[in-house]
Amino acid sequence: MFIILIVEPIEGFNPLNPDLLRDPKYADLSESDRAAKCTEVHQARLVRALQHIRESVRPAVARSFFVKNWITLDQYKEVVPTVTRAARTTGSTQDATMEEIHDTFSTTELDPLDVDLNMPMPNQDTRTCTKNNNMLTMTLWNANGCNRYTVDQTTNSLLTSSLIFITETWLLSPLRLMTSWQQYHTYGIPLEGQSRGQMGISLLVNPDCPYPVTHFPSDNPYVLSCQVSTLLVHCVYLPPSLSDLEAMDILDGLPHQSHPSQTNMIVCGDFNARHQHLLGDSRTTTRGIKLFSWILENGMTCWNTQLAYGIPTYCAQGRVNATTGEHFNSVIDLPLSWFRPSSCVVVLCPASTTVSTCSPSSFVESE
């Protein structure tokens, strides 16, 4: 969004630099007092800013400020006095207990920082990408039907992926994919007179995934949600059969945070939305226009725009343009993030989109 609005961030800016404290009434303060005053002023500004952020996203922003030591614990609790751990169900949220968060839901109220989910919290170690122990890689695969007996061919070709999100699996309950990877499903919908279903989203978790994964079960057939470390991830499949209003209602219903440990949100999947300006696609659809507005209104970053502009994510081998002789392709599989990561590199291919993250706040896409 910075690029769209032609705003250039100041690299290396330190808001705690005492030299920024230029009010004459502080001129006689010692260096240590100036540093303390600068911290006090900065914290006050952040607290005021938090009070103007929408309630649905305020806890996650406040949590991010706290773990970065930008605000104190008391200031955090002042802005977010009571936070409940929630898991998304059918059209609403319920509070999940610590023991039942994977399976069932019951009501419990937590202290804002009672976040013992056995998940690594952001610290100096997790903010520094180490290739061997905390590189997280997420692959998005638009399958258009997934053969559950040969899925190992996919996992074997993506051994560096920590997570594989698969859209349009066509998998019906209670079937499972034949793989040793841990798996979670939003099952497809049966088709009359056929043995397979339609729609469906699956998540495969590599046995070597460096972070614990918590799946949030839901009856919503268009969404699969999970938490990976401090990332809240929603994978969506919004079929063309949905009206634009229905598709946007689904996106509007995605929680920005279901637990105070979540400091960023990723929304990925097959949106079936096309936009020339946003994505570099060959045409713009009405859903694409609405999605563009939704991204801007929610302060999301579209990584196709930033790093893979105009690169198709879907190619229909059976459909050829009669005029150009080229295969039909489009940019409809998108990774979006709530907070902008610090550094990224990307190469996309039509078969899949792979997103690698060094930490919960920065990720890199690669082929």
Image (spheres, rainbow, N blue to C red):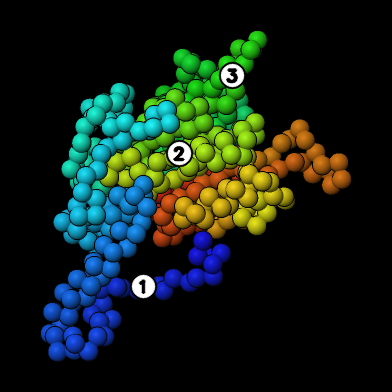
The answer to whether residue 138 is above or below residue 79 is above
The one of 81 and 63 positioned closer to us in this rendering:
81
Q: Is residue 335 visible?
A: yes
Q: Is residue 102 above or below residue 14?
A: above
Residue at label 3? 197
Nearer to the camera, 104 or 207: 104
Q: Secondary structure at mark 3?
A: strand
The residue positioned 18% from the left and 43% from the top of the image is 111
The amino acid pointed to by label 2 is Gly
Residue 253 — which label? 2
Q: Position of residue 11 (x, y in %)?
A: 40, 72
What is the crowding at mark 2: few (fewer than 14 residues within 10 Å), some, or many (at least 20)? few
Of all residues, the one furthest to the right in this rendering is 323
Location of residue 281 in the rendering, given as x and y in whole percent from the top left corner: 68, 51
Q: Which mark is residue 12?
A: 1
Instruction: Give the alpha-carbon distance from disc 3 to disc 2, as whole Å.
Output: 25 Å
Residue 292 lies, with reference to residue 5, above or below; the image says above
Residue at 26% x, 85% y: name it: 22
For mark 1, does the 10 Å Cα neighbourhood hold few (<14), some (14 to 19), or many (20 or more) residues? few
Q: Which sits in the foreground, 48 or 362?
A: 48
Residue 83 picture quarter = top left
Q: Which residue ends up furthest to the top in the rendered image?
A: 193
**What percent of the width, then of the height, locates residue 153?**
54, 28
Instruction: Specify the amino acid type for callout 1.
Output: Gly
Sequence-first tag of 2 and 1: 1
Q: Secondary structure at mark 2?
A: loop
Identify the residue at image location x=62%, y=53%.
Answer: 279
Q: Nearer the viewer, mark 3 or mark 1?
A: 3
Q: Earlier in the sequence, mark 3 or mark 1?
A: 1
What amino acid is labelled 3 in the image? Gly
Q: In the rendered image of this protein, does residue 26 appear above or below residue 256?
A: below
